[in-house]
Image: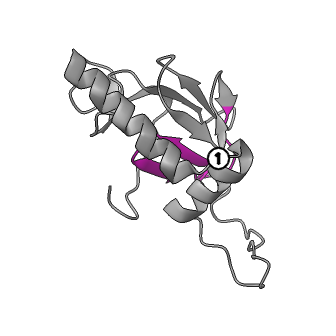
Amino acid sequence: HDDGLLYLIPEGKTLICNTEKEEEGAGIRLAGQSIFNEHVWVEYNQEAGTCNLEPAHPDAVVWLNGEPLKEKTNLNHCDRLILGNDYVFRYIDPTKSGEKKEVEVDADGKPVVMDWEYAMEELSKKQGLDAETAIAEYKAEFMKELEDR
């Protein structure tokens, strides 16, 4: 859970999974009990200029810009991605990273910082819930399920 950690997405299909997955094909490994052994697929096609996300497990927690990811979806430059209970990422399209982007500002005219707090606020507004509380409840339920196994 390092700030500023960068994952380069290779050409083709990459599996984002739990660090415990030992099989071939595990591309990006994330620690944590809320990350499934097969969590989400990322498919990057440099020639077409596309990067898609697709759920790899029906119960995997994946939010894209505050909305649940239910089907294969194209990523856009600066999209926010929440995986499980602990990970927030921002997708940077390498073909657009050099472009000047209009700085988003809040109601007071201050620049918006797209960090964990921003992602949780976005999720809360779009889903009509308190994201931090919902994640804590989900985590408690998940831990109980693990104990019952």
Q: Is residue 92 above or below residue 127?
A: below
- At a point 71% along the width and 84% down the height, the residue shown is 110
Across and down, in percent, residue 143 comes to 29, 31
Amino acid, disc 1: Leu
- At a point 30% along the width and 22% down the height, the residue shown is 145
Across and down, in percent, residue 21 comes to 24, 23
Position of the C terminus, as image quadrant, is: top left
Q: Nearer the viewer, residue 43 or 57?
A: 57
Residue 22 left/right relative to 32: left
- At a point 38% along the width and 64% down the height, the residue shown is 3
Across and down, in percent, residue 31 comes to 27, 40
Q: Nearer the viewer, residue 7 or 62?
A: 62
Residue 40 visible in the snapshot: yes
Residue 95 left/right relative to 7: right
Residue placed under numbered mark 1 in the picture: 129
Circle 1 SS class: loop
Q: Nearer the viewer, residue 141 or 54?
A: 141
Position of the N terminus, as image quadrant, is: bottom left
For the record, the magenta segment spans 74-94
Q: Is residue 83 above or below residue 125?
A: above
- At a point 71% along the width and 46% down the height, the residue shown is 128
Residue 115 visible in the snapshot: no
